[in-house]
Amino acid sequence: MSRLLSFGCSFTAGAGLIDIYPSSVKTSRFAWPELLGNKLGRSVVNQGKSGIGNLEILNHVLTTKFEPSDIVVIMWSQFVRHDSFRYNLIPIGTRIVEREFLKHNPIEEQWWIDNNRARNWLTIHQCSLYLKSLNIPFVSFMGIVGHNDTLPYPKLDIPNLLTDIKVSDWFIDRALDDDGKGNGHPGIESHKSIANLIYDRIELNG
Amino acid sequence: MARLVTFGCSYVYGYGLSDCYKHSSDNPSKLGWPNMLADRIGYECLNKAIPGAGNFEILITLLDTPLEPDDIVIIGYSYFSRYDRYRLISKSGNGKTIANNRQEHKNMILNMVDNSNYEEKNYWDNWLAIQHGELYLKNKGVKFLCFQNIEDSIKELKPISLVHLTNFWYEGSLVHIDSALDNRHPGIESNKLQCNKIYSKLFEDNQ
């Protein structure tokens, strides 16, 4: 059976959903990649991994062996996590514990925000060009948008980035880790919405 | 007229050659290998090299330069150690070199978060930038050639399988056989030799 490969963070893994909660390392059968794979009649390889940023997603894509019949969907992660991934165990890399990373970084300083934003968009650009060079059908979209992430790096034409899919279009409920204060992962209805939105785009584009 | 578009640091800029030294260095030299090569093949030369640039700045310059389908692009990559000197610090995408001298640069690196693995991080940042440039140029469909222009900055550094480079010329480093007026940068004979090397690679290797 042809495969759907998904890449992303906990929003792709399905963190907080009923079949894996409270695990942060498993992937859920209720997460959008599984739902989308079912609609497309494809087996699913869900590479979603909690806590990862976009440089680590690029690393996952670069280290994946693709098959010609694969399709790929990427949900991009929080921009603030970009530098928490380091290529210090060649070629796999490792992640600095996020809370330690954030504690020591000047994330409130404008130069860091600007530079970090640009590097995220460059990573997204590079990953998209890489998949295009392999002739693998793919789309990507933004999963978590913070207040400093929204301005794309100018002049970058990013192939197959679904800019019209907004987080507000699909984030309609929360998972079991909802703390009642606006924190928590997307719930099952949100995952269904993502699967439907992406399915429509894939169908539209053949 | 079709264009030869070159990117790199002072070695591509031609700093130190007689028309590009001290107070007359606001524009790239016309005597360096980019112009020699452009003249030889009948192309217009657009030299986008920036003295002092690292490979991140070279990548950003490449991405910000409109290219035409019949352009030939040549990138002579710079010292790996310069990568983090350049940061994109404005919403418009314009960046800034934040460390202009060696001590300032050294202090900046020492102050970087988690500098215990700085060298490996820097290694990957550079190779990923080089891969990014290659993917971008392939996608543009232009003819291009990329290499490390400064010999001693690369040594054993070759990317492993994670960075899929298919068009990187590992033997492309400029051979320094004479010096320019500053006694540091390559002189006119070194530039002639580099011009011949690149010409052979571009137009004779596959014949």
Image (tube, coloured by chain):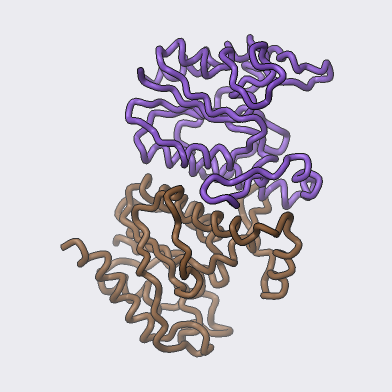
Chain colours: A purple, B brown
Q: Residue at x 58, y 40 (%)?
A: A56
Q: Quadrant of the C terminus of chain A?
A: top left
Residue B121: quadrant of the picture: bottom right
Left or right: B37 in relation to A164:
left
**Percent coordinates x, y for residue A95 in the rendering:** 65, 43
Left or right: A178 in relation to B189:
right
Residue A32 higher or lower than A60, as above or below: above
Q: Residue at x 34, y 58 (%)?
A: B144
Residue B33 higher or lower than A192, as above or below: below
In this rendered view, identify the residue nearer to me: A80 or B160.
B160
Residue A182: quadrant of the picture: top right
Residue B159: quadrant of the picture: bottom left
In this rendered view, identify the residue nearer to me: B178 or A90.
A90
Number of labels in the image equals 0
**Percent coordinates x, y for residue A81 in the rendering:** 68, 40
**Percent coordinates x, y for residue B64 in the rendering:** 50, 53
Q: Residue at x 46, y 56 (%)?
A: B130
**Percent coordinates x, y for residue A5 in the rendering:** 46, 26
Left or right: B182 in relation to B138:
right
Q: Residue at x 56, y 17 (%)?
A: A32
Q: Quadrant of the N terminus of chain A?
A: top left
